[in-house]
Amino acid sequence: MKYHHGKNVSLSVYPNNRIILRSPRRISQKFILEFLDERKSWVREQYLKNLSQNPKKTDFQENEILPIFGKNRKIIFSKTENSEITPESIILNVKGLRSEKGRVLRAKNLLRQEIEKQARPLILKYCSKIGTTKYSLNVKTMRSLWGSCSPKNKITLNLALIFCPEFVFEYVIVHEVSHTKERNHSKKFWEVLSSLYPNYLKAERWIKENGKKVLCYLY
Ligand SMILES: [Zn+2]
């Protein structure tokens, strides 16, 4: 439950089944209980729909399967091999790990490194096409953005992009690279973008249809 300064009480069920009730402080408990009671079956419906359609948040268990750039790969624990993403699997070195938190951290680091490895040549390619010479790259988990580009051309990519197909990954990179020339989503921006990546609508459609699901792996 969250208090807010708005006038209304609202209830949201997110794709990862986080359920949040927002209310102004002055609303009585009685009102809230009635409000919830009226929406019980709706919440249940949303909850079950999410449960059946969306992936659960990963804690990187052994043998768990994750789609890496759109291709399913199984997590394999190893105490001798280095952590690595191969065409078939996600090898996770678990030597010295004592907690689930440590494992999740190590796995996320591996995913971050993989994104950086794949993103760098693409950023270089598209930046040189439009003459951008100064930029930097950052990868982190974000709830609502797939990428961003700061005024100093710091390109930030969402870690969840690792669970998207390659054409979507490439699109988000081209989108952010285009922002190094055009900061806003102006007509000129879309011209730059479509000259670099003509098939961008396909990627946008994919994100619209699947983006929220993919985020459930991390949230
Ligand atoms: Zn943008």
Image (cartoon, rainbow, N blue to C red):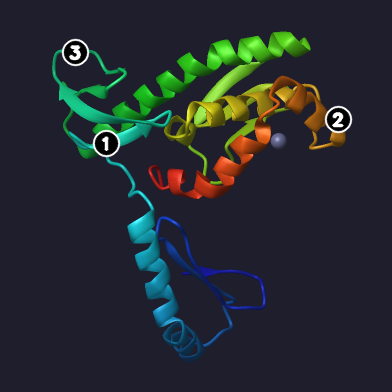
Q: CA distance from mark 3 to mark 2?
A: 48 Å
Q: Is residue 173 above or below residue 143?
A: above
Question: Dot 3 surroundings within 10 Å: few (below 14), some, or many (20 or more)?
Answer: few
Q: Which residue is mark 2?
A: 188
Amino acid carrying mark 1 in the image? Ile
Q: Earlier in the sequence, mark 2 or mark 1?
A: 1
SS for tag 3? loop
Front-lying residue, 90 or 218: 90
Looking at the image, which residue is at 36% across and 34% down?
Answer: 67
Q: Position of residue 76 (x, y in %)?
A: 19, 26
Hey, which quadrant is residue 90 in on the image? Answer: top left
Residue 106 in view, yes or no? yes
Q: Is residue 70 above or below residue 177?
A: below
Q: Which residue is mark 1?
A: 65
Q: Earlier in the sequence, mark 3 or mark 2?
A: 3
SS for tag 1? strand
Amino acid carrying mark 2 in the image? Lys
Mark number displayed over residue 86: none
Q: Is residue 86 above or below residue 53?
A: above
